[in-house]
């Protein structure tokens, strides 16, 4: 994978998971740190059972409060985390499962959270999806009018 030029789009990244997503969260965090990207980890800090809404809420509030520009959520399917995060105004969390869904979530929907399913997406693909998410710019234009309606 190529070097991420993150500072051109996002300055701050936060990450959280539930127990099912813990190992993938740690892999993503390590990957980003190795690329010299600062990552704020909201937990959990082990793979003991936790409730995913608690962590999705923490991350969504951090982005809503502009303490981070973008977030990464990981649970078993990505769905529970995205549903929870999307309850908050100005949050646009997208479950991403391939390169096209990831690219379009940024280009057309200005997604500010990527939600990944650790039980459905292999680690190698997940790392590629995070990279694409972080490198892809929102196109604006006709899409901005639609995003404003959300």
Image: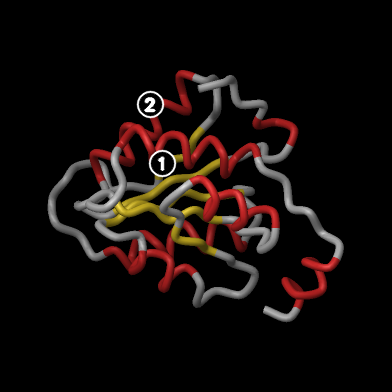
Q: Nearer the viewer, residue 118 or 54?
A: 118
Position above or below: 6 against 101 = above
Using the rendered view, name the quadrant where residue 27 is placed: top left
Q: Is residue 129 shown above or below 32?
A: below
| Identity of the residue furthest to the bottom in this view | 149
- The residue lying toward the viewer, choosing from 1 and 14, is 1
Mark drawn on residue 30: 2
Mark drawn on residue 7? none
In the rendered image, residue 82, in percent from the top left (x then y), is placed at 43, 66
Q: Residue at x 52, y 20 (%)?
A: 35
The image shows residue 18, relative to residue 133, as above or below, that is below
Q: Is residue 39 left or right of residue 52?
A: right
Dividing the image into 4 quarters, which one contains the C terminus? bottom right
Q: Callout 1 environment at 10 Å: few (<14), some (14 to 19), or many (20+)?
A: some
Left or right of 48, for residue 76 = right
Dot 1 corresponds to which residue?
41
Q: Which x, y percent locates residue 99?
A: 51, 45
Kindly state the secondary structure of the residue where label 2 is placed. Answer: helix
Other residues around mark 2 within 10 Å, as few (<14) / some (14–19) / many (≥20)? some
Q: Residue visible at 32% across and 51% down?
A: 17
Judging depth in this view, the residue of 123 and 85 nearest the camera is 123
């Amino acid at each position: 994978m190529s070097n991420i030029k993150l500072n051109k789009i996002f300055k701050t990244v936060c990450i959280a998971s539930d127990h099912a997503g813990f190992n993938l969260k740690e892999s993503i965090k390590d990957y980003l740190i190795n690329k010299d990207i600062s990552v704020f980890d909201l937990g959990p800090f082990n793979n003991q059972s936790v409730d995913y809404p608690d962590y999705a809420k923490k991350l969504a509030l951090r982005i809503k409060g502009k303490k981070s520009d973008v977030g990464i959520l990981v649970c078993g399917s990505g769905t529970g985390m995205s549903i929870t995060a999307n309850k908050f105004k100005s949050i646009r969390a997208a479950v991403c499962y391939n390169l096209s869904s990831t690219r379009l979530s940024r280009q057309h929907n200005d997604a500010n959270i990527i939600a990944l399913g650790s039980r459905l997406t292999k680690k190698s693909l997940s790392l590629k999806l995070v990279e694409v998410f972080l490198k892809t710019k929102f196109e604006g234009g006709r899409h901005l009018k639609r995003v404003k309606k959300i």
